Image (tube, rainbow, N blue to C red):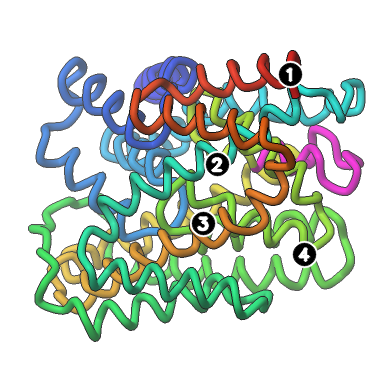
Amino acid sequence: MPRLLDIFLSFLRLGTTSFGGPVAHIAYFQREFVERRKWLDDETFAQCVTVTQLLPGPGSSQTGMLVGWLRAGPAGAAAAWLGFTLPSSLIMAALALELPHLNLHAGWLHGLLVVAVAVVASAILTMQRSLAPDITRLAIAVAVLALVLFVPAGVIDPLAIALAALAGVALLRGRVKTASATLDLGVSRRAGAAALVLFALAFVALGMWSASGSPGGGLANTLFRVGALVFGGGHVVLPLLQTQVAQAGIVDSQTVLAGYASAQAMPGPLFTIASYVGASAYGRSLGWSGALLGTVAIFAPSFFLIPGVAPFYRMLGESSGFRAALAGANAGVVGLLAAAFVTPIVPSAIHTWVDALVAVAAFAALYFAKAPAWAIVIASALIGALVL
């Protein structure tokens, strides 16, 4: 128990102070758990980061879960997740529940919508440099962009990523470096297979709950699927989340966009936008229980997939075909985010030349000046209150 409490308090402090998004979170973890506390060495920590690249869901949170798991088993993973997630989750839920008492047409809220344009544009370019750095992967990204824009089907996002993975196998095999996989979580292949079976059963059970007409079932099913299908971390959750919750009639697109912008000013994982969505769901009828349900649902796939993939990691990590598929899927993520940028993000936020000017200024501060996202969000909200 003292070890679990130590894990929880360590991650709670990071969840309160770690601004800057997933990449910054990884740096905070390395400094805290490798350099300062020496819970694990650099090589093991690097393996933790590599494993999360194979999985959908929140990359930095999953890295934290792995650190907690290596320290104290599954309970340690749960303690790490709870500590890192709790601060921003509570703030995001409270913000959503306070919206009825605020002026929804206030300039500050429009400022949040405008800065979301800059944040997503910066994320697209940053991700393109790392995930689609060559002409082949850039072509895969552009193909996904075109497919999502011109084939408006409800299931096109995951289908586009699957096609990008197949393109990766066909075009990138042998060109992607394989990792030397050594991480061991102490999970047997039988236990890993059982975790993956439970993951599939959870998909089915939540689908049945949603089909029953229950608002809670609709919320849990939608956010579980988002958590299970989003590759690329927090900045990529917006397009799939916005599409899925709007189509299901849970929350309108503008509310999701405002929540996404607000999440940029929060410490901890961007995936706590699920707390905001859950609290806002169905006209805020679920309240705090909706926030809790939404938060658990979007993070739940990670608790199945981490032990499910862990025992097969060495085999997958050294397979050139799998690494090529992953490289193709990652390039597809860039196209997916670009499609969401074209519509609905820009049309939802940019209505006048002043909006466009503020968005360009925010983008320049984020991308070129490397200003912290939370500071830009706060500044844009203030500008919105005064000007927009």
Q: Which residue is mark 2?
A: 271
Residue 166 in the image: above or below residue 360: below
- Say which residue appears at 35% left-offset and 30% top-offset: 25
Examine the image and state in which quarter residue 378 appears. Answer: top right
Helix, strand or loop at label 1? It is: loop
Magenta range:
274-290
Chain-order first, disc 2 or disc 1: 2
Check disc 1 and report the residue beneath it.
Answer: 387
In front: 333, or 16?
Answer: 333
> From mark 3 to mark 4, how far is it between C-alphas?
21 Å
Kind of residue indicated by mark 1: Val
Residue 1 in sight: no
- Which of marks 3 and 1 precedes in the sequence? 3
Tell me which numbered mark, 1 or 4, is placed earlier along the sequence. Answer: 4
**Residue at 44% of width from left, 69% of height from top?**
196
Residue 302 position, x and y percent, is 46, 52
> Which is nearer the N-term, disc 3 or disc 4?
4
Q: Nearer the viewer, residue 220 or 176?
A: 176
- Asked which secondary structure carries label 2, the reply is helix
Query: Which of label 3 and label 2 is nearer to you?
Result: 2
Q: Main secondary structure of the magenta part?
A: helix
